[in-house]
Structures are given as C-alpha cells and as structure tokens.
Image (cartoon, helix red, strand yellow):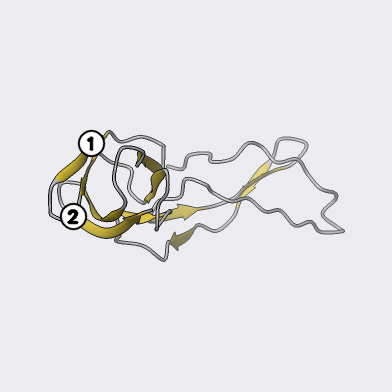
C-alpha cells in the first residue's frame, strides 16, 4: 500500500509537448518504494513502475546537521520509531537525556544555551541499534 506524499500537482501542458515535474520528499526514510500516479483530466489514471530508493545513510539512525553547534544541536533522523537520545560531556556525565516518540518529524533539536563550550558525544538508540557521534559546542 502506498501513501500520498505530495499534494496534487497541476499539469504543465499537453502530452504532445512533454513536461517535466520535480518533487522532493522532505521526510524520506532510509529506504522507500515510490511510484507516480498520473491522473488525466477525465479522471482516468496510470501508475508508473515502482522503484526502491535508498538513502546514502541507510543503516544510520541520525546525522548531525550542525557540527560544530552554536545555540542548538540539530539532528536529522533517519528512522520513524521511538528513539532515546543521550548527550554526554567530555568526562562522561549525562547532560541531556530525552525520549522521542515515533512521528513524522525527521529532525530533533537540543538547546545548547546552558551547556559550556567543548566536546560532547551524542548517542541515539532505537532499542536494537545504537549510534554515537562527537559534537563540538562553540
């Protein structure tokens, strides 16, 4: 079963002249199947071939969108399931901890306003996988 990911896109012209359409899926998962449903003016439709697209970061839980970070640490999340996040300072103390319930959001932000400058590590876990990355707060 497929879910619609875009609003209906209006026609750019007639089929004899050809048209080009572009759409970017802002909430892409690590891998997904895509197809296009083309609907004619009379309501008839056709479906494109189904293709599988895999993100370059398949297998990763997240990627740091800001590193070094100033003001906020922003993470791009690649899974749509419950996650736990833990931020440790350079001596291993937990300075931030959160759980994120599954949802449509593909990003997460941690405020750094009350954290001193320095090297930190952020660990994200989905219960099965665990990923840790270093982040610098400026």
Which residue is at the front of the view, 81 or 10? 81
Outermost residue toward the front?
Answer: 116
Q: CA distance from mark 2 to mark 1?
A: 17 Å
Outermost residue toward the bottom?
Answer: 56
Q: Residue at x 36, y 51 (%)?
A: 78
Q: Is residue 46 left or right of residue 34?
A: right
Please identify the quarter of the rendering in which residue 10 is found. Answer: top right
Please identify the quarter of the rendering in which residue 85 is found. Answer: top left
Seen in the picture, residue 34 relative to 98 is either above or below; the reply is: below
Which residue is at the front of the view, 57 or 112? 112
SS for callout 2: loop
Q: How many marks?
A: 2
Callout 2 environment at 10 Å: few (<14), some (14 to 19), or many (20+)? few
Marks 2 and 1: CB-CB under 8 Å?
no
Q: In the rendering, at what x and y percent does residue 4 appear?
A: 53, 39
Q: In the rendering, at what x and y percent does residue 91 appear?
A: 13, 55
Q: Which mark is residue 129?
A: 2
Split into 4 quadrants, where in the image is the N terminus? Answer: top left
Q: Residue at x 18, y 55 (%)?
A: 130
Q: Residue at x 33, y 57 (%)?
A: 136
Callout 1 environment at 10 Å: few (<14), some (14 to 19), or many (20+)? few
Seen in the picture, residue 117 relative to 104 is either above or below; the reply is: below
Which residue is at the front of the view, 112 or 99? 112
SS for callout 1: strand
Q: Is residue 102 left or right of residue 104?
A: left
The residue that mark 1 highlights is: 98
């Amino acid at each position: 079963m497929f879910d619609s990911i875009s609003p209906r896109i209006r026609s750019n012209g007639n089929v004899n002249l050809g048209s080009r359409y572009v759409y970017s899926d802002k909430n892409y998962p690590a891998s997904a199947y895509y197809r296009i449903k083309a609907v004619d003016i009379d309501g008839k439709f056709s479906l494109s071939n189904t293709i599988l697209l895999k993100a370059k970061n398949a297998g990763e839980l997240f990627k740091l969108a800001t590193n070094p970070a100033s003001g906020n640490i922003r993470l791009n999340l690649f899974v749509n399931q419950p996650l736990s996040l833990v931020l440790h300072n350079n001596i291993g103390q937990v300075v931030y901890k959160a759980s994120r319930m599954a949802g449509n959001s593909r990003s997460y932000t941690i405020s750094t306003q009350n954290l001193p400058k320095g090297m930190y590590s952020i660990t994200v876990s989905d219960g099965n996988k665990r990923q840790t990355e270093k982040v610098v707060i400026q």
